Image (cartoon, helix red, strand yellow):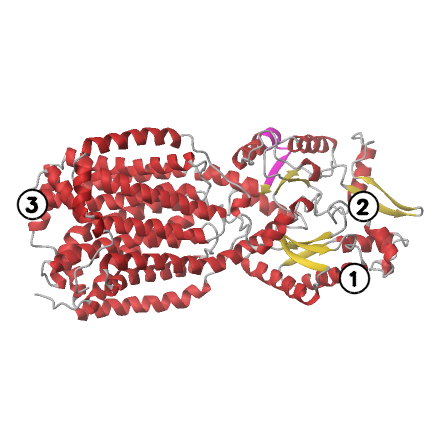
Amino acid sequence: METKPRRLVSRLGEAFIEKTLFGRRAIIVSLFLLTTLWLGFQAVQIKPDASFEKMIPTFHPYIENFLAHKDELKGLGNAVRVVVENPNGEIYTTDFLDTLKQIHEEVFYIPGVDRTAMLSIWSASVRWTEVTEDGFAGGPVIPDTYDGSAVSIEQLRANVLKSGKVGTLVANNFKSAIIYAPLMEFDPDTGEALDYKLFSDRLEKRIRDKYQSDKVIIHITGFAKVVGDLIDGVTQVALFFAIAVVFSLLMLVFYTRCLRSTLIILSCSIMAVVWQLGILHSMGLGLDPYSMLVPFLVFAIGVSHSVQIFNGIVHEVAKGADGLTASRNAFRTLYVPGLTALISDGIGFATLMVIEIGVIQELALTASIGVAVIILTNLILLPILISYSGVSPRAIKKLVDEEEGHSHPFWHFMANFTQRRRAAIVLLVGAGLFVVGFTQSGDLKIGDLDPGAPELRPDSRYNLDNQFITENYSTSTDILVVMVKTTADQCSAYETLDTLDSLQWQLEGVPGVQSTYSLVNFTKIALSGMNEGSLKWNALNRNQQLLNAASVQAPPGSFNSNCSLAPLIVFLNDHKASTLTEVTGEIERFAAENGTDELQFLLAAGSAGIEAATNKVIETAQYKMLAWVYGVVFILCWLSFRSLRTVICILLPLSLTSLLCQTLMAQIGIGVKVATLPVIALGVGIGVDYGIYIYSKMQGYLDQGLGLEEAYFNTLKTTGKAVGFTGITLAIGVGTWTFSPIKFQADMGILLTFMFIWNMVGALTLLPALAAFLHRRPKTA
């Protein structure tokens, strides 16, 4: 700190760059205008984008196992459940059954549904079985002879009971029935990836809107419906964006006292968003529900840097410079810290690429593109435009009044933090907060902490639909699938079934497990049925011929075509991280003790299995991500200032904010998951700007020979004031997200608001307090 910083880009020659840019202002403005028109045309064509495989860590062993056997596990991956309820009684009425059939056929013909694996009581593959004097008897639950008469309905009632589908396809109270529809990853009509927004809209229009009445109530759950509801809700981000623009306009006019400069600032920041969206569409990408919030952050970062540039220009004009000279001088002064801060932002966001989940990697790419664009639109174009427009006399008068005024009690109070006695108090408070954060952040949980879809509000229609299924059916929607792999024709071998039976017995004693089902269950029932229904025979028999005869009648999905894979389905109470960790841990221990080359227990498929894999990736990735983002920021700050003391002053306030953010998450019940993991990296990336701008300005005054306290006082009146303004403005802007119907957006609003405020407070208080002890120059009066 005691030496003048040798900045990262000084070799590029600020004077040369400034001369090149401002010497060709008209050409540059024309190029920006043409580029904006072209990218604007691209931006208006961008569409919401979502993919099942983008939401999951495809490189995790669990997911690799699932994808390798996906074709053999039809119905155990991405699927929707359409529940048809009779609010006035049971399902056994002619009108209701006719309606259920019509809905079944509607779902059957929706593009994207895997029709071969679709299930309901109207499916021919859903059968009943019973033991008679002559042996086994059975057939479709709804036979070809069904005619809606009272007799056929009574026969249907009996068939449902014999089928064993009560609690799975028919509610325990017989008042509703499920249509289970597995999905393909592509739309057969177009050959392109399945459009979840379109699929969700089709479910609404062709099912809920068409059939729901006072006699029929429709409930729909599944990944596709979650994504559709998210996209419907997240489109409200446009409303929040509009609110942010209007609020920023009002705040900037109040701060700058210059309407034309305010409009230029907003125009350049909106231009950055337009360029970002246009570039994404040109690359063939869209906006998924998680990256839809990034354009607002790009706008916020643009406004933040623009305020610093405007501040510098007004100061130059107040010294007597004309508009062009003031813009050139401000650009030369702020080019290095601004570029350093933006590069730190961009690379910090890019570190999210280490998390091998598609939506997070696309979010990282989207944010990095946005920050790169800000370098052009706000760091270069903004001062050029203001060099044409100039600043209003009111803005200059406001600055002169503030600068020449002798009464700055608040700034004097803040400048006192550079005095070692008061700095010690600040550092003690910071140390206390660090201890509190360190002890409390240990309660931070990985994964979802709420039932249903935690991305949506608990009272959302989707979560109410999911609650209905949980309350009325024996099997939950949280399914974990173990793939039991053998050599060909050995899935029904006694050793295989006996080992699988042992695993089921162990799992059913694990807290959080509702029930289990596999080929073992059917084989035991079949053996009992083959022996007059005797319960004594409801067990595995060592006679392999009997086992083969029993298992061969198992329903589709119990094993694959060459009997080398038999799925074990585990129904869970919920998909909380603690439940998944305990269940997968038990399975892994069992597999290690009992697995062989010929008999393997592979994790995992099903919604809960995918969630378990995602949690494991996030648990490891959160620390890797933090190490990368802080490592990158450390290196860039050190290359810019060549002073370890300076880097400490900038990074310690950021690290305290990150720790306190984790504490906040733990206390208000927000888990670390796909939606919240990027928040800390985004907060660090934006927050580092405050420290870089403040320290750069303070170092400039120190280089002029001022003492630390006086240098910081002058910094507060200029850059510090702008940091306080942008911190509060951005915090209020993202604070509006807390009113979103999308819970993860509301969670991100809470966390980003917290980080914006605390990063600002840390840069204005903790940074000078650290400098008081690390700075070696004597302080002047």
Nearer the camera: disc 3 or disc 2: 3
Disc 1 element: helix
Q: Magenta region: which residues?
A: 206-220
Distance Cα–Cα, label 3 vs label 1: 89 Å
Q: Crowdedness of circle 2 by 10 Å Cα count: few (<14), some, many (20+)?
A: some
Say which quarter of the image contains residue 217: top right
Distance Cα–Cα, label 2 vs label 1: 29 Å
- Mark 1 or mark 3, which is nearer the start of the sequence? 3
Distance Cα–Cα, label 3 vs label 2: 91 Å
The quarter of the image holding the N terminus is: bottom left
Name the foreground residue: 413 vs 4. 4
On the question of residue 409 being in view, the answer is no
Disc 3 element: loop
The residue drawn where x is 77% and y is 58% is: 497
Which residue is the site of mark 1?
495
What is the number of the mark on residue 173?
none
Which residue is the site of mark 2?
162
Q: Position of residue 327 (x, y in %)?
A: 15, 41
Q: Position of residue 533 (x, y in %)?
A: 87, 54
The quarter of the image holding the C terminus is: bottom left
Relative to 9, say whether 656 is above or below. below
- Residue type at mark 2 is Lys
- Residue type at mark 3 is Lys
What is the number of the mark on residue 319?
3
The residue drawn where x is 64% and y is 66% is: 589
